[in-house]
C-alpha cells in the first residue's frame, strides 16, 4: 500500500474541518423557523363571535361548528389541521392568528382539541336562545337600524311581521 | 417518564399507508446529517421484525389495510407507533372519504378486532410534519421533552337571560 493511500483519511479530516458541523442539535437547540412558516392557529377567545366562517372554509374540517339549543361550540382539532391559514384570512373579526408553533406531539389525542363554547343570548319575547352576544354587537356595529328587532328571535320577528301585514289588510 | 424498553438505540420502520409522500420526505429529511437522528440511536430498518418504533404515515387506505395489519403484527411487543402527519392522526382532508379508514383513531378499533395491540401511540400533527416535529415526537417517546399541548375549553358569554 502506498503512502498516498494511507494518508487519505487525514486528507478527509481536513476537508471535513473546512466544511464544519451542519447538524442542529434540535431538542436542545433552537430550530430554524422562517417568518413564512405556518403552524398551529391561535383563536383569540376575547374576539371570536362564533359565526362559523372559519369552519365553513376549513378544507379538512379541523375547525367545526356544532349548534346546540343553548350554545354554539367551535372545536379546533389540530391533529387534522393542514395549516393552510385560510381561517385567519376569512375571520371577520380577526380572532384567528397563525402562530409558528409546531411542537404538537402528544400521546393522548384529546390534548389536540381546543373548544370554544359560546353561550347563546335569549329572545326578549319568547326567551329562546338564538344569537351570541358578540354577534349581536357586531351586527349592530354594521347595521345600526337593526336595533329595533335584533333582540327578537327570527320566529318572533316573523310573527310580528305577519301581525303587521294582517292588520294592514283590515 | 422514561420507558424501560427504550433504554437502548431505537430502530424505526417506515410504514407508508397511502400517504402523499409529503411526510415520507420529511422522515427522510430527519435522517439526514442536518438533523442527525443517530444522536438518539435512531436507525431506519428494512423489516418490521427488527423495529422498535413504527413511523406510520398516511390516512390508511382500504387497499393498504391488510398489509398494514400484517406489518404491525410482525412488530415485536411493546409496539410503539408514531402517527405522523394530519392524515395519520385524524384522517387529514380525507377524513370522511370512502376509500380511507381515516386516521389512527378508527384504525385502532379495526386492530382490536384483529387482536393486534399497540402499546403506545405518539401523535405528531402537521401537514407535512416538520422534521423537527418528528424528532420532537420521538424525543417525547424517549422522555427527553415534555408535552406542550393540552385540551383547552373556553366558555364565552353569560348564558341566556331575559
Image (cartoon, coloured by chain):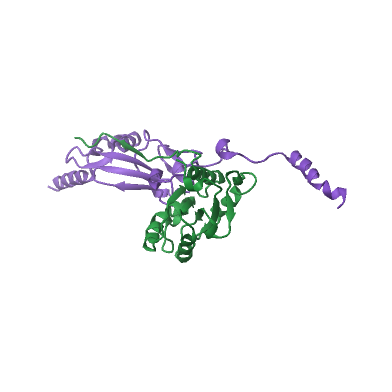
Residue A5 to residue A116: above or below: below
Q: Is residue A139 visible?
A: no
Q: Nearer the viewer, residue A15 or B120?
A: B120
Q: Nearer the viewer, residue B154 or A97?
A: B154
The residue sitting at 30% across, 43% down in the picture is: A72
Asked whether, in this view, residue A117 is left or right of residue B74, the answer is left
In the rendered image, residue B84, in percent from the top left (x then y), is placed at 49, 51
In the rendered image, residue A7, in percent from the top left (x then y), is placed at 83, 46
Q: Is residue A163 visible?
A: yes
In the rendered image, residue B79, in percent from the top left (x then y), is placed at 46, 54
* Chain identifier, purple in the render: A
The residue sitting at 37% across, 48% down in the picture is: A64
* Chain identifier, green in the render: B
Q: Nearer the viewer, residue B143 or A154?
A: B143
Total marks placed: 0
Q: Nearer the viewer, residue B44 or B25?
A: B44
In the rendered image, residue A142, in percent from the top left (x then y), is placed at 35, 36
Asked whether, in this view, residue A24 is left or right of residue B119, the answer is right
The residue sitting at 84% across, 50% down in the picture is: A5
Residue, far left: A170
Amino acid at each position: 500500500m502506498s503512502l498516498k493511500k494511507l494518508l487519505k483519511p487525514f486528507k478527509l479530516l481536513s476537508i471535513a474541518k473546512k466544511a464544519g458541523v451542519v447538524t442542529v442539535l434540535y431538542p436542545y437547540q433552537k430550530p430554524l423557523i422562517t417568518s413564512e412558516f405556518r403552524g398551529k392557529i391561535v383563536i383569540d377567545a376575547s374576539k371570536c363571535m362564533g359565526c362559523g366562517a372559519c369552519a365553513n372554509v376549513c378544507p379538512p374540517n379541523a375547525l367545526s361548528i356544532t349548534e346546540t339549543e343553548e350554545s354554539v361550540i367551535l372545536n379546533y382539532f389540530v391533529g387534522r389541521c393542514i395549516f393552510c391559514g385560510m381561517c385567519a384570512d376569512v375571520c371577520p373579526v380577526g380572532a384567528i392568528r397563525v402562530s409558528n408553533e409546531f411542537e404538537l406531539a402528544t400521546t393522548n389525542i384529546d390534548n389536540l382539541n381546543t373548544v370554544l363554547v359560546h353561550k347563546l343570548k335569549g329572545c326578549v319575547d319568547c326567551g329562546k336562545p338564538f344569537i351570541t352576544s358578540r354577534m349581536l354587537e357586531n351586527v349592530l356595529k354594521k347595521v345600526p337600524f337593526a336595533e329595533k328587532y335584533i333582540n327578537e328571535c327570527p320566529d318572533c320577528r316573523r310573527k310580528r311581521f305577519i301581525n303587521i301585514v294582517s292588520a294592514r289588510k283590515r | 417518564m422514561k420507558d424501560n424498553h427504550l433504554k437502548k438505540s431505537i430502530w424505526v420502520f417506515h410504514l407508508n399507508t397511502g400517504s402523499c409522500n409529503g411526510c415520507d420526505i420529511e422522515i427522510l429529511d430527519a435522517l439526514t446529517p442536518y438533523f442527525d437522528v443517530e444522536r438518539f440511536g435512531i436507525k431506519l430498518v428494512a423489516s418490521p421484525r427488527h423495529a422498535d418504533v413504527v413511523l406510520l404515515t398516511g390516512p390508511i387506505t382500504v387497499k393498504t389495510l391488510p398489509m398494514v395489519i400484517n406489518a404491525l403484527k410482525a412488530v415485536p411487543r411493546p409496539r410503539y407507533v408514531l402517527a405522523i402527519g394530519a392524515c395519520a392522526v385524524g384522517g387529514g382532508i380525507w377524513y370522511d372519504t370512502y376509500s380511507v379508514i381515516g386516521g389512527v383513531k378508527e384504525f385502532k378499533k379495526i386492530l382490536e378486532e384483529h387482536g393486534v395491540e399497540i402499546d403506545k401511540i405518539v401523535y405528531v400533527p402537521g401537514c407535512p410534519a416538520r422534521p423537527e416535529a418528528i424528532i420532537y415526537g420521538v424525543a417525547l417517546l424517549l422522555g427527553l421533552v415534555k408535552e406542550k399541548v393540552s385540551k383547552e375549553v373556553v366558555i364565552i358569554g353569560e348564558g341566556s337571560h331575559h
